[in-house]
């Protein structure tokens, strides 16, 4: 039964010719191959991508891999969906057709040509952006046409209009960069300075796109010297953290802000700059607003910052830090638990105040549950170290019953 029909009355029968011969599910984007057989686009593309060169039904050789949309069949399927909506059938959307290579080449040529008027180049870029948003296949096609080199030149060209640069930046962050691309940007101080300044642009979209490119460059650069050169700019920390502070930030903005801050904090020598820019307060204040993946990354960043003295002091000064970290244990994921336990271990090792707050927040119960759980070995070791560290702070009625849970040998993390 297809995904869209899972909750349906089981008496609803999908007409045989509406089913894809490969997946046997209702077709959403029927296309016809050169043998005359029709398949759902995603299914036949997967079939060909795995190295098959024959028609699945007729076994005839596919001499042409062009897929022709079967609009008539798609409309019949849509009509059938509407007729059966009383049974919970949802109408399949009209699919957007994939971009043609000739169109992509034309748009890129139009955007790159300095002899074209600005409005014409902007129009080409906006159309490219729309195509890239439509599907992974379109992005793959566009990426195969040297798009990164063209866009990088447009983003950092001093002779182009700012609007052209910003539109190029919006498209560039939709594509993964090669290490060569990252090094080319990271090794140019003027380009890094340009991105840093864009973090304070009046448009939140431009700011977020700049942060996204900075994160991509840091993550894609192996050179520790180049990463240090980027993270040495204090305004980059300030700009990224301002994105996280902004109450109007979208989920995408929060995700990019967290990714950017984490990438910057991986550089040990400049973590104090993150603290000075307000990273500790911002991470704690925003933690509850993040989805699972972003919360994991935020907790990893908190643990990194707790490894330096000023970072510990900043987190200790925030009244919600310890209670929030204790609450996080065993609540989000194994990774999140490990990072939270690591941060708490650093804070409690540095501050008696944090020890008292942790005990009051119920950390003993959380740690005892953690050492008995299926969590990672690193998380359990950190929990055991915390149990030993907090031994003198335990309530009297629990101290005598906790020996079974504490390991005599502690492995440092």
Image: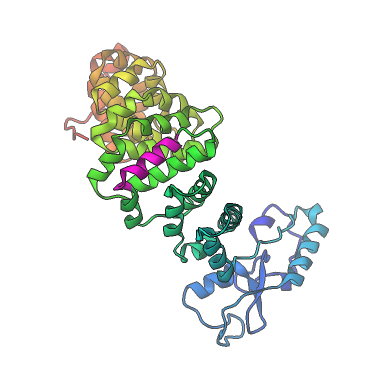
Picture coordinates of residue 255 (x, y %)? 47, 39
Picture coordinates of residue 239 (x, y %)? 42, 32
Q: Is residue 194 magenta?
A: yes
Q: Please tell me in which quadrant of the rendered image residue 9 appears.
A: bottom right
Q: Residue 14 versus residue 183: which sits nearer the camera?
A: 183
Quadrant assignment for the C terminus: top left
Residue 402 visible? The answer is no
User: From the viewer's perspective, is residue 166 above or below residue 352?
Assistant: below
Dominant secondary structure (helix, strand or loop) of the stretch shown in magenta: helix
Rendered residue at 32%/55% (across/down)? 179
Quadrant assignment for the N terminus: bottom right
User: From the viewer's perspective, is residue 248 above or below residue 227?
Assistant: above
Picture coordinates of residue 124 (x, y %)? 59, 58
> In the current view of this chain or complex, which residue is farthest to the bottom?
60
Rendered residue at 27%/32% (across/down)? 270
Snapshot colouring: rainbow
State left or right for residue 99 relative to residue 143.
right
User: From the viewer's perspective, is residue 277 above or below residue 252?
Assistant: above
Q: Which residues are magenta?
A: 186-199
Q: Residue 303 versus residue 388: which sits nearer the camera?
A: 303
State left or right for residue 307 relative to residue 102.
left
User: From the viewer's perspective, is residue 22 above or below residue 220?
Assistant: below
Residue 204 visible? The answer is yes
State left or right for residue 183 relative to residue 9.
left
Q: Is residue 142 magenta?
A: no
**Numbered disc total:** 0
Picture coordinates of residue 3 (x, y %)? 64, 57
Q: Residue 169 versus residue 403: which sits nearer the camera?
A: 169
Q: Please tell me in which quadrant of the rendered image residue 101 appears.
A: bottom right
Rendered residue at 31%/25% (across/down)? 344
């Amino acid at each position: 039964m297809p995904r869209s029909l899972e909750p349906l009355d089981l008496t609803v029968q999908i007409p045989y010719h509406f089913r894809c011969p490969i997946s046997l599910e209702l077709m959403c984007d029927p296309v016809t191959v050169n043998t005359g057989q029709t398949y759902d686009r995603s299914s036949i593309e997967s079939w060909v991508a795995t190295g098959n060169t024959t028609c699945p039904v007729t076994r005839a050789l596919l001499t042409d891999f062009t897929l022709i949309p079967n609009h008539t069949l798609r409309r019949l399927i849509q009509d059938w969906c509407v007729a059966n909506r009383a049974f919970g059938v949802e109408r399949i959307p009209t699919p957007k057709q994939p971009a043609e290579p000739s169109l992509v080449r034309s748009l890129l040529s139009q955007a790159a040509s300095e002899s074209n008027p600005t409005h014409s180049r902007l129009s080409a870029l906006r159309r490219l952006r729309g195509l890239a948003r439509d599907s992974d296949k379109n992005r793959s096609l566009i990426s195969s046409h040297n798009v990164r080199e063209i866009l990088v030149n447009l983003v950092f060209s001093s002779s182009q209009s700012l609007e052209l640069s910003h539109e190029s930046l919006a498209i560039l962050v939709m594509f993964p960069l090669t290490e060569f691309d990252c090094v080319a940007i990271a090794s140019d101080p003027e380009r890094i300075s340009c991105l840093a300044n864009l973090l304070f642009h009046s448009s939140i979209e431009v700011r977020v796109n700049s942060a996204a490119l900075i994160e991509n460059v840091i993550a894609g650069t192996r050179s520790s010297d180049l990463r240090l050169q980027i993270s040495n700019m204090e305004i980059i920390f300030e700009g990224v953290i301002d994105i996280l502070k902004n109450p109007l930030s979208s989920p995408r903005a929060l995700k990019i802000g967290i990714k950017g801050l984490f990438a910057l904090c991986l550089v040990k020598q400049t973590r104090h700059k993150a603290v000075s820019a307000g990273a500790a307060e911002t991470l704690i204040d925003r933690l509850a607003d993040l989805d699972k993946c972003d919360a994991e990354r935020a907790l990893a960043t908190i643990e990194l910052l707790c490894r330096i003295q000023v970072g510990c002091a900043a987190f200790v000064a925030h009244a919600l830090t310890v209670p929030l970290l204790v609450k996080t244990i065993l609540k989000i994921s194994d990774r999140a638990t490990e990072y939270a336990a690591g941060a708490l271990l650093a804070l409690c090792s540095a501050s008696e105040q944090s020890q008292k707050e942790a005990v009051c927040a119920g950390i003993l119960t959380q740690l005892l549950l953690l050492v008995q759980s299926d969590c990672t070995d690193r998380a359990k070791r950190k929990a055991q170290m915390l149990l030993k560290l907090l031994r003198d702070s335990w309530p009297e009625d629990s101290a005598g019953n906790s020996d079974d849970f504490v390991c005599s040998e502690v492995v440092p993390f």
